[in-house]
């Protein structure tokens, strides 16, 4: 069952990014999935040296992501727009953030973990769609490179968080 708003259809003119990372952990699926859910709830996918999270994970709360790039830091504001908690097959847990006017892009990012009972697989998914604001469009190639880097590093951060749990 999904709580909050329904996922938005990506607006025309937005770029999409999808990243899927398997959990390479050992243990029962339930244990690994519960560890992954805990990691998402604690925003561990942002645990990387070039990103700092400022805010809370309360639904509807404003959150700021501080990002280091090209020798400076930029602050990007967003808020949780919906929460996902689906039981069944696959079982899914996560949330999505939508950008606020203070953000460099017009975007939404969804962070979920899934359990597939058929093959006992646990996955971490990041799905995003975005369009740069007028100012950010001047640095479009850099923005896309940062998004791809974030997707890659986010999957690694989730792996580390599950291993430490």
Image: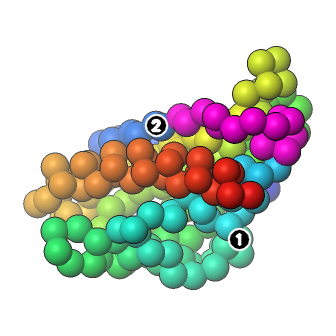
**x and y percentages locating residue 45 in the rendered image:** 55, 58
Relative to 35, residue 42 above or below: below
Q: Residue at x 16, y 68 (%)?
A: 70
Q: Nearer the viewer, residue 144 or 119?
A: 119
N-terminal label among 1 and 2: 2
Q: Residue at x 55, y 36 (%)?
A: 21
Write down the quadrant of residue 28 in the picture. top right
Relative to 103, residue 5 above or below: above
Q: Residue 75 vs residue 56: left or right?
A: left
Q: Nearer the viewer, residue 57 or 154?
A: 154
Residue lying farthest to the bottom in this orientation: 55
**x and y percentages locating residue 81 in the rendered image:** 62, 62
Q: Residue at x 69, y 43 (%)?
A: 113
Residue lying farthest to the left in this orientation: 138
Q: Does the segment drawn in magenta span residue 8?
A: no
**Residue 103 in sight from this viewpoint:** no
Magenta span covers which residues?
20-32
Q: Nearer the viewer, residue 149 or 94?
A: 149
**x and y percentages locating residue 2 in the rendered image:** 78, 49
Q: Residue 63 vs residue 115: left or right?
A: left
Q: Which residue is mark 1?
A: 59
Task: Rate crowding at label 1 as few (under 14), some (14 to 19) or many (20 or more) other CA atoms within 10 Å.
Answer: some
Q: Residue 159 vs residue 162: left or right?
A: left
Q: Considering the numbered disc 1 on the image, is that residue within a helix, a strand or a loop? A: loop
**x and y percentages locating residue 55 in the rendered image:** 57, 82
Q: Which residue is mark 2?
A: 18
Q: Residue 3 vs residue 57: left or right?
A: right
Q: Considering the numbered disc 2 on the image, is that residue within a helix, a strand or a loop? A: strand
Cα gap from disc 1 to disc 2, whole angstroms: 23 Å
């Amino acid at each position: 069952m999904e709580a909050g708003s329904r996922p938005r259809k990506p607006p025309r003119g937005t770029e999409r990014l999808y990243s899927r990372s398997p959990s390479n952990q050992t243990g029962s699926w339930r244990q690994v999935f519960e560890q992954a859910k805990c990691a998402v709830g604690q925003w561990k996918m942002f645990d990387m040296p070039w990103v700092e999270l400022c805010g809370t994970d309360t639904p509807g709360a404003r959150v700021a992501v501080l990002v280091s790039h090209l020798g400076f830091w930029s602050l990007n504001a967003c808020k949780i727009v919906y929460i996902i908690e689906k039981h069944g097959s696959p079982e899914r847990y996560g949330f999505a953030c939508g950008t606020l006017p203070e953000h460099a892009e017009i975007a939404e990012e969804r962070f979920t973990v899934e359990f597939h009972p058929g093959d006992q697989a646990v996955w971490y998914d990041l799905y995003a769609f975005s369009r740069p604001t007028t100012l950010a469009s001047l640095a479009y190639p850099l923005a896309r490179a940062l998004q791809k880097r974030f997707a890659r590093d986010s999957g690694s951060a989730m792996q580390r968080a599950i291993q430490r749990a």
